[in-house]
Amino acid sequence: MLSRRHFLTGLATAGVLGATGCTIPDSVTPRERAQCVPRDSLPGTRRLAGVPLHYEVDGGTRTFHLDPAFQQQLEAWATDWQETTGLRFDRLDTYGTWIDGRGQCDSWHHSGRALDIARLRLNGRAVVSCREDLWADDPAAASLRRGYWALAAHLHIHFAYVLTYLYDEAHRNHIHLDNGISGAGLSSFRSGSRVQVQAVQATARWLFDEPIEITGRWDAETRRTSRAILQASGHTGDLTDQANWHAYLRAAVRQLRSA
């Protein structure tokens, strides 16, 4: 049995870009089901919003295959990120986009509608690193974690399904995002989504310095904390209102600039 890392590297060598193949949990009911599509049915690109894409495993450039509508959403995210944060990047390191489902269509990677981000770089330096597996014990981990969660918060605006290191061990080296739930629109908050609740709790803890426990449960403490943060940013109500959800996330991203 090959290790996952060797398997992915082998796929890349064969010209089939390997991604981590994040599956759709049973608890998630997307608007539609992922479909296995052939690689040749998707346009290939080496750039996203003008920025070159590099394969995180070996640092080399590759041709990545993406659903055209999903690529447009990614480019809108990339533009919004740089305008919102002022943090430009001239290289995006990724573990992949499309991957061959081999008949098991349980991931949006198989549809070319998912991306795994490892790092955003500028002039060779990581602006944001999603490699929590490398920096978790670093003396600068607190600062790196703030950048990580600011990026995750911004991704949560544009995509309803964003998986971080809190999701499982397999996501310690990247952030996964796809549009399987949110489709062509921006995201909305669902209090039953463990992924989104984890994001609220983690951003409250790491960006707003609130001593909140990260449980993934939409409990009274989480509701109270998120409402207080919303109120401080000039909004009232709950995150189940889409405008409030986006306001909360953008307030979280702004905390990175105010640090």
Image (cartoon, rainbow, N blue to C red):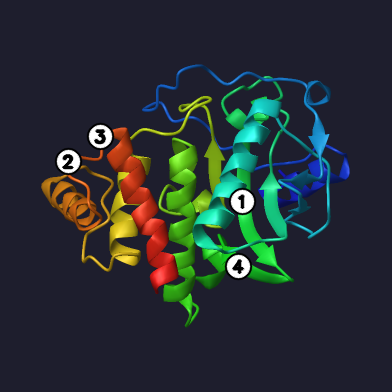
Residue type at mark 3 is Thr
Residue type at mark 1 is Ile
- For the residue pair 246 and 148, the one nearer the viewer reads as 246
Q: Give the mark nearest the N terminus, 1 or 4.
A: 1
Q: Give the mark nearest the N terminus, 4 or 3.
A: 4
**Figure quadrant of residue 19:** top right
Considering every residue shown, the one lying at the far bottom of the view is: 139
For the residues bearing labels 4 and 3, Cβ distance under 8 angstroms? no
Tell me the quadrant of the picture where the N terminus can be found.
Answer: top right
Where is mark 4, residue-wise? 127
Q: Is residue 161 left or right of residue 112?
A: left
Judge depth for marks 2 and 4 and give the one in front: 2
For the residues bearing labels 2 and 4, Cβ distance under 8 angstroms? no
Q: Give the mark nearest the N terminus, 2 or 4.
A: 4
**Figure quadrant of residue 14:** top right
Tell me the SS state at disc 1: strand
Residue 207 locus on image (x, y percent)? 35, 65
User: Residue 237: which disc?
Assistant: 2
User: Residue 240: which disc?
Assistant: 3
Residue 256 locus on image (x, y percent)? 43, 66
For the residues bearing labels 3 and 1, Cβ distance under 8 angstroms? no
Q: Is residue 235 left or right of residue 152?
A: left
Q: Give the mark nearest the N terminus, 3 or 1.
A: 1
Q: Is residue 29 left or right of residue 227?
A: right
Residue type at mark 2 is Gly
Judge depth for marks 3 and 2 and give the one in front: 2
Q: Is residue 253 above or below residue 161?
A: below
- For the residue pair 86 and 60, the one nearer the viewer reads as 86
Q: Residues within 10 Å of mark 1 (few under 14, many from 20)?
A: many
Where is mark 1, residue-wise? 117
